[in-house]
Amino acid sequence: MIRFEVAAGLDIVRLVMTEPSVWRGITDDTCPPAESFRPLALPSIQYVLAFDDEELLGLWMLAWQNGVTIDIHTCLLPSGRGPRGLEAAKRLAEWIWENTRCQRITTSVPAYNRLALRFAERAGMTRFGVNEKSFLKHGKLHDQILLGLSRPEGR
């Protein structure tokens, strides 16, 4: 059964985010080496851990952009990818609606990352724009696709 928990400390966050396959997916050319990385501890950021029963699937970083908009970043461990990760992503939106004042969830995905784009769309997000040449990876500037999901009416 999928459940969520706000991370109580940053050690588990760092462990998930620096897992090699996660780190490759979330970083650009300007990021420090994984060994030097320390997650941000700010009031505007929450790290929400996703579990399937007791197994950690990964986490989402929720960064408040203003009083009603959260920008999310997905960090799923290899064991959390596939159908369980997709189920967790869909349930995360419900968790956000039930536990926060958020009215809009957004994310950005480098255009070359078709798997992440498909994942976000299958989780319910829709494309609303392009941030051109805004992500530097392997020495090349890439566009980022902007996606979002609004709180359903009456929620």
Image (tube, grey):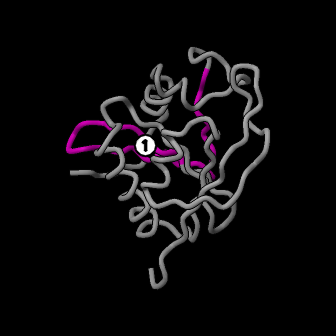
The residue closer to the viewer here, 38 or 146, is 146
| Horizontal side, residue 103 vs residue 93: left or right | right
* Majority SS type along the magenta span: strand
Q: Secondary structure at mark 1?
A: loop
User: Compared to 17, does 114 lie above or below?
Assistant: below
Give percent across and percent down for residue 84: 29, 45
Give percent across and percent down for residue 41: 60, 40
User: Compared to 54, does 95 lie above or below?
Assistant: below
Q: Is residue 43 magenta?
A: yes
The residue at the point 51 percent across, 41 percent down is 116
Q: Which residues are magenta?
A: 37-61
Amino acid type at circle 1 is Ala
The residue closer to the viewer here, 49 or 111, is 111
Residue at the disc numbered 1: 7
Classify residue 31 by image quadrant.
top right
The residue closer to the viewer here, 23 or 51, is 23
